[in-house]
Image: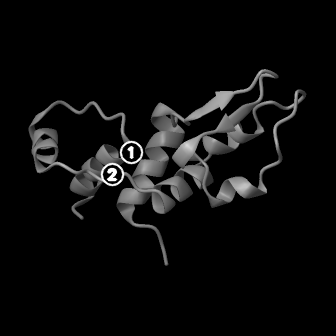
């Protein structure tokens, strides 16, 4: 099964244009770990961070592979029709994956 144009658009947007805002925390040793919904199945194959390589998860969580899996495994839903209607008339300021997906679907005609 191939990815929809909207999904491709989102992944490309986050990897090439804006930079994906990965959610995580640093421990006392400066190592970065994903938190909550940010950790998905593809993270299991990434080596644990160490003091020498503290950003192994962070680097992975900003990759196209992770962004794609994050969207597919833990989608963020738009819960309000009013919000969706506002998005059609408001200037485009998108910081949420769910809203970006909505906009991408509109742009791609899906």
Residue 7 drawn above or below residue 92: below
Residue 39 drawn above or below residue 73: above
Residue lying at 21% horizontally and 61% vertically, measured from the top left: 109
Tell me the SS state at disc 1. Answer: helix
The mark found on residue 97 in the picture is 1
The mark found on residue 74 in the picture is none
Q: Colour mode?
A: one colour
Front residue (pair 16, 1): 1
Residue count near mark 1 (Cα–Cα under 10 Å), binned few <14, some 14–19, many ≥20: many
Q: Quadrant of residue 89?
A: top left
Residue 76 drawn above or below residue 27: below
Q: Is residue 28 left or right of residue 13?
A: right
The mark found on residue 101 in the picture is 2
Q: Is residue 99 left or right of residue 33?
A: left
- Asked whether disc 1 touches disc 2, contact meaning CB atoms under 8 Å apart, the reply is yes
Q: Residue 20: x and y, percent?
A: 51, 37
Q: Residue 55: x and y, percent?
A: 75, 32
Q: Is residue 67 left or right of residue 106?
A: right
Residue count near mark 2 (Cα–Cα under 10 Å), binned few <14, some 14–19, many ≥20: many
Tell me the SS state at disc 2. Answer: helix
């Amino acid at each position: 099964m191939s990815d929809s144009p909207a999904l491709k658009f989102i992944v490309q947007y986050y990897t090439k244009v804006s930079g994906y805002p990965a959610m995580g925390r640093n421990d006392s040793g400066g190592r970065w770990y994903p938190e909550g919904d940010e950790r998905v199945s593809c993270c299991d194959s990434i080596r644990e961070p160490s003091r020498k390589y503290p950003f192994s998860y962070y680097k992975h969580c900003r990759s196209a592979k992770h962004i794609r899996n994050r969207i597919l495994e833990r989608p963020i839903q738009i819960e309000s029709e009013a919000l969706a209607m506002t998005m059609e008339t408001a200037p485009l300021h998108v910081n949420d994956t769910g809203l970006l997906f909505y906009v991408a679907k509109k742009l791609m005609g899906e």
